[in-house]
Image (spheres, coloured by chain):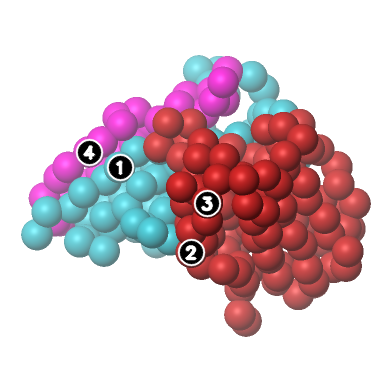
Chain colours: A red, B cyan
Amino acid sequence: DAGVIQSPRHEVTEMGQEVTLRCKPISGHNSLFWYRQTMMRGLELLIYFNNNVPIDDSGMPEDRFSAKMPNASFSTLKIQPSEPRDSAVYFCASSLGAHEQFFGPGTRLTVL
Amino acid sequence: SQQGEEDPQALSIQEGENATMNCSYKTSINNLQWYRQNSGRGLVHLILIRSNEREKHSGRLRVTLDTSKKSSSLLITASRAADTASYFCATDAEGAQKLVFGQGTRLTINP
C-alpha cells in the first residue's frame, strides 16, 4: 500500500506566483482532507471532500486558495497569487468514512 | 480556537520511563483520536476512543477518556528513543469527519 502521495515535497516560489499542490489518496478511501501546519497556528483543516464533492471549505483562508477533486484518485490545492504568509507545510489526508485519517508526507511551501 | 489542548506543551524524560500527556476539549464529542508526528513527517494515527469508552490499550499505549471532565490522557509505558515525536489529540466536535487538532505535546526521550 503506497499510502497518501503528495507532490511536490518541497516548493520554493516567489510572491505572486501560482502554486499547485497535488495529492493522491489511498485507493478505496472516500474522504480527502487538506490541512496546513505552521508553528503559529498549528494544524488547520482547510477543506475536505466526500466522494469527490467539497463538503466544508470554511477553513480556506481567502479567495486566493482553491481546491479541486476531479476524481477519486486525485486532488489539487492551488494558491494564486501566493504570498509569504502562505509559507507552511500542507498535508493531504484520506479516510474511509468517519474513521482514522491517513496523512501524506506533506509539501513544504516557501514563498519568498 | 483549538478544540483540543494538550498539556504539557513539551515533555522530556529518560528512556524506560512512562510518559503521560493530557488533552482537554470544550464541547461534546463522539470520539477522540491521538496522532503522532515525527519531525518532518505526516501525522500517524495511534488510537481512537469512543465517547462510551473509558479506557483503551494498544501495545505500550493506554488512553483514557473522561467525558464528564472533557479530558483524555495518553500514557506511553517503557518509553524508547523512537517515541520522540509530537503527539496530538483530535476531536470530532465540529462534525464526524471534521477533526480539530490541538497544538500538540512535544515528547523527547533521552537515552
Task: Categorize mark 2 by other alpha carbons within 10 Å: few (<14), some (14-19), many (20+).
Answer: few
In percent of width and height, residue A17 lies at 63, 52
Cα distance in 3D space between marks 2 and 1: 24 Å
In the rendered image, which residue does mark 2 sit on?
A10
Q: Residue at x 81, y 38 (%)?
A: A56
Check residue B106 in the rendering and tell me which mark sits there, or answer none: 1
Q: Secondary structure at mark 3?
A: loop
Quadrant occupied by the N terminus of chain B: top right
**Closest to the observer: B38 or A54?**
A54
Q: Secondary structure at mark 1?
A: strand
In the rendered image, which residue does mark 3 sit on?
A14
**Closest to the observer: B24 or B57?**
B24
In percent of width and height, residue B61 lies at 38, 53
Q: Give above or below for A24 relative to A15.
A: below
Residue at the bottom extreme of this rendering: A1
Task: Categorize mark 1 by other alpha carbons within 10 Å: few (<14), some (14-19), many (20+).
Answer: many
Amino acid, disc 1: Arg
Q: Chain of mark 1?
A: B
Amino acid, disc 2: His
In percent of width and height, residue B14 lies at 11, 50
**Do tag 1 and tag 4 residues touch (Cβ < 8 Å)?**
yes
Amino acid, disc 3: Glu
**Do pointers 2 and 3 mark residues of a single chain?**
yes
**Do tag 2 and tag 3 residues touch (Cβ < 8 Å)?**
no
Q: Is residue A26 visible?
A: yes
Q: Residue at x 39, y 45 (%)?
A: B87
Cα distance in 3D space between marks 2 and 3: 14 Å
Q: Residue at x 62, y 81 (%)?
A: A1
